[in-house]
Image: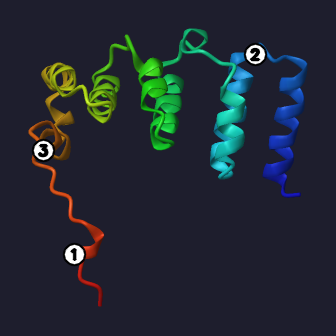
């Protein structure tokens, strides 16, 4: 067992003793993700709610993890009500993934008003409906 996996095991054991410790649970989730143990990370995350986590970076981390796994509704819960422009940008992407384009456009506009450096051309194109997708059968293979 590698040192990192031993640490992961120790975190799991510690969490069994204090399952309500949100900070410890997030440490375990981050460690599991770092080691590519996404299923363990998601399982460890389950009993935790966004209301238990005050740190915005932690909430954004969880939202991104859930988004990567296709859990857009759950991810949105983790960044709902957050106030930073970066979190608003993530919210806009999640809203668009959920088919809520009008709401996504409003949130994106707010993020840009707060920080113009967050301009995201790909997101803008998706909001404008200019995403072009090609069926794999039409892709030339070499």
The crowding category of the residue bearing disc 2, from other C-alpha atoms within 10 Å (few below 14, some 14 to 19, many at least 20), is: some
Q: CA distance from mark 2 to mark 1?
A: 52 Å
Q: Position of residue 28 (x, y in %)?
A: 72, 34
Q: Which mark is residue 125?
A: 3
| In-front residue for pair 127/89 | 127
The crowding category of the residue bearing disc 1, from other C-alpha atoms within 10 Å (few below 14, some 14 to 19, many at least 20), is: few
Residue 131 higher or lower than 28, as above or below: below
**Dividing the picture into quarters, in which one does residue 109 lie?**
top left
The answer to whether the residue labelled 2 contacts the one labelled 1, judged by CB atoms less than 8 Å apart, is no
Q: Name which residue lies at 54% across and 15% down.
A: 50
Name the mark nearer the viewer: 1 or 3.
1
The answer to whether the residue labelled 1 contacts the one labelled 3, judged by CB atoms less than 8 Å apart, is no
Secondary structure state at the residue bearing disc 3: helix
Q: Position of residue 116 (x, y in %)?
A: 14, 30
- Identify the residue position indicated by label 1 in the image: 138
Q: CA distance from mark 1 to mark 3?
A: 23 Å
Residue found at the very far front of the displayed protein: 137
Q: Earlier in the sequence, mark 2 or mark 3?
A: 2
| In-front residue for pair 12/127 | 127
Q: Which mark is residue 22?
A: none
Q: Earlier in the sequence, mark 2 or mark 1?
A: 2
Secondary structure state at the residue bearing disc 2: loop
Q: CA distance from mark 2 to mark 3?
A: 42 Å
Q: Name which residue lies at 31% across and 35% down.
A: 97
Q: Name which residue lies at 37% across and 10% down.
A: 81
Name the mark nearer the viewer: 2 or 3.
3
- Identify the residue position indicated by label 2 in the image: 21
Q: Name which residue lies at 20% across and 20% down.
A: 103
Q: Is residue 114 left or right of residue 12?
A: left
Name the mark nearer the viewer: 2 or 1.
1
Q: Earlier in the sequence, mark 1 or mark 3?
A: 3
Q: Is residue 135 left or right of residue 10?
A: left
């Amino acid at each position: 067992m590698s040192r990192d996996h031993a640490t992961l095991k120790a975190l799991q054991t510690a969490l069994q003793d204090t399952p309500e410790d949100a900070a410890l649970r997030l440490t375990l989730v981050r460690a599991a993700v770092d080691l590519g143990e996404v299923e363990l990370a998601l399982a460890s995350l389950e009993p935790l709610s966004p209301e238990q986590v005050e740190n915005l970076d932690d909430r954004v981390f969880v939202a991104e993890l859930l988004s990567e796994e296709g859990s857009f509704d759950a991810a949105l819960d983790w960044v709902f009500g957050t106030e930073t422009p970066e979190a608003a940008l993530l919210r806009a992407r999640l809203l668009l993934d959920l088919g809520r384009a009008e709401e996504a456009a409003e949130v994106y506009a707010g993020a840009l008003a707060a920080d113009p450096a967050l301009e995201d051309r790909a997101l803008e194109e998706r909001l404008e409906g200019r995403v072009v997708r090609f069926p794999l059968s039409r892709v030339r293979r070499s």
